[in-house]
């Protein structure tokens, strides 16, 4: 029996650039989108519609979206954290949006400004509003594998959030290892719980764990995961969690699984990563030197 194809969502332009202290020009971001697509990446998280004072690196969400025409590309998506962000994304032409709740109470208060129950209620309302507008919704759960402030996150809390989001109509659920605390055993356990609660395996958003990221990928594949968020050069983190580490690098996953499983040419992906590194270097040389 042939192995299942792996879906890659490229998140560097959102999760990666939001971490920079410098601002990448809008035209450079648009060129990144074009080059990523030319390299075969059809699922691209382009930006986030958030308050510019909170994430100034993504203050050009409307301008960037106008340059890349998300209405013509159903695989282009945007992150939204509240109803205003959702309205802006829909007005910009997105037919796919991502939203998030946190499994950590301190992180929910810091990232979303609400305790978990209120954030979950708002997320379910946003799912309904997005789907009434004809948009596909992926609902993510941040801190699903642990929190540096709260510590261990009970698996039942994760399972409950998955069930509530799935029952609320989310088209897909994603579990996020926001600060790189996931282990192979934890991935096996929590992917299984989420799969049972949602009726399908979740996508995974993995942050790097030095010496262990490919072990986590292997555990995820064994557990049935076929969709990964990745970031070219591994750039990224979380602006509301200072201990967050970089993302699973797109070139690492594609290099590990190859063209046959991902549909992506490792050489083309390497070229896209090189272009992104040059763009980041122009905006923030010190950050680029670390990627």
Image (cartoon, rainbow, N blue to C red):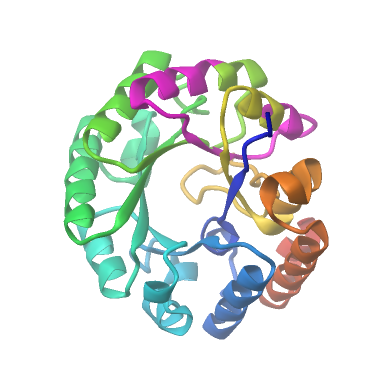
- Identify the residue at image location x=68%, y=28%: 1
Q: Position of residue 176 (x, y in %)?
A: 50, 36
Q: Position of residue 268 (x, y in %)?
A: 77, 65
Quadrant of image for the C terminus: bottom right
Q: Quadrant of residue 2?
A: top right
In the depicted structure, whether residue 71 falls above or below residue 132: below
User: What's the magenta region?
Assistant: 189-216
Q: How many numbered badges does the structure rendering display?
A: 0
Q: Position of residue 99 (x, y in %)?
A: 35, 49
- For residue 229, side relative to residue 200 (left or right): right
Seen from this angle, which residue lies furthest right? 267
Q: Quadrant of residue 245?
A: top right
126 and 257: which is toward the camera = 257
- For residue 56, side relative to residue 217 (left or right): left
Determine if the magenta segment contains residue 67. Answer: no
Q: Position of residue 88 (x, y in %)?
A: 27, 69
In the depicted structure, whether residue 145 falls above or below residue 75: above
In the depicted structure, whether residue 182 falls above or below residue 269: above
Q: Residue 34: tell me if it is visible.
A: yes
Q: Residue 252: tell me if it is visible.
A: no
- Identify the residue at image location x=28%, y=58%: 135
- For residue 13, side relative to residue 162 (left or right): right
């Amino acid at each position: 029996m042939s192995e299942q194809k792996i879906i890659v969502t490229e998140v560097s332009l959102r999760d990666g650039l939001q971490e920079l202290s410098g601002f990448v020009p809008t035209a450079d971001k648009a060129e990144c989108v074009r080059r990523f697509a030319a390299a075969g990446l059809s699922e691209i998280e382009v930006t986030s519609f958030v308050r510019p004072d909170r994430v100034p690196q993504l203050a050009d969400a409307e301008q960037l979206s106008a340059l890349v025409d998300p209405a013509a590309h159903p695989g282009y998506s945007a992150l939204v954290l509240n109803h205003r962000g959702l309205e802006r994304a829909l007005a910009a032409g997105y037919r796919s949006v991502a939203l998030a709740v946190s499994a950590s109470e301190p992180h929910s208060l810091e990232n979303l400004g609400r305790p978990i129950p209120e954030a979950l209620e708002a997320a379910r309302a946003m799912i309904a509003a997005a789907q009434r507008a004809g948009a596909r919704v992926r609902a993510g759960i941040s801190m699903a594998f642990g929190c540096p402030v709260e510590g261990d996150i009970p698996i039942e809390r994760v399972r409950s959030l998955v069930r509530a989001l799935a029952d609320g109509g989310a088209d897909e659920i994603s579990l996020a290892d926001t600060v790189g605390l996931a282990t192979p055993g934890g991935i096996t356990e929590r992917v299984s719980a989420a799969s049972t609660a949602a009726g399908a395996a979740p996508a995974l958003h993995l942050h790097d764990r030095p010496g262990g990221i490919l072990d986590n990928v292997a555990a995820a594949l064994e557990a049935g995961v076929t969709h990964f968020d990745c970031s070219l050069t591994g750039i990224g983190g979380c602006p509301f969690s200072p201990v967050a580490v970089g993302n699973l690098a797109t070139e690492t996953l594609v290099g590990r699984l190859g063209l046959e499983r991902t549909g992506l040419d490792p050489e083309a992906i390497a070229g896209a990563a090189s272009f992104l590194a040059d763009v980041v270097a122009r905006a923030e040389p010190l950050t680029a030197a670390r990627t």
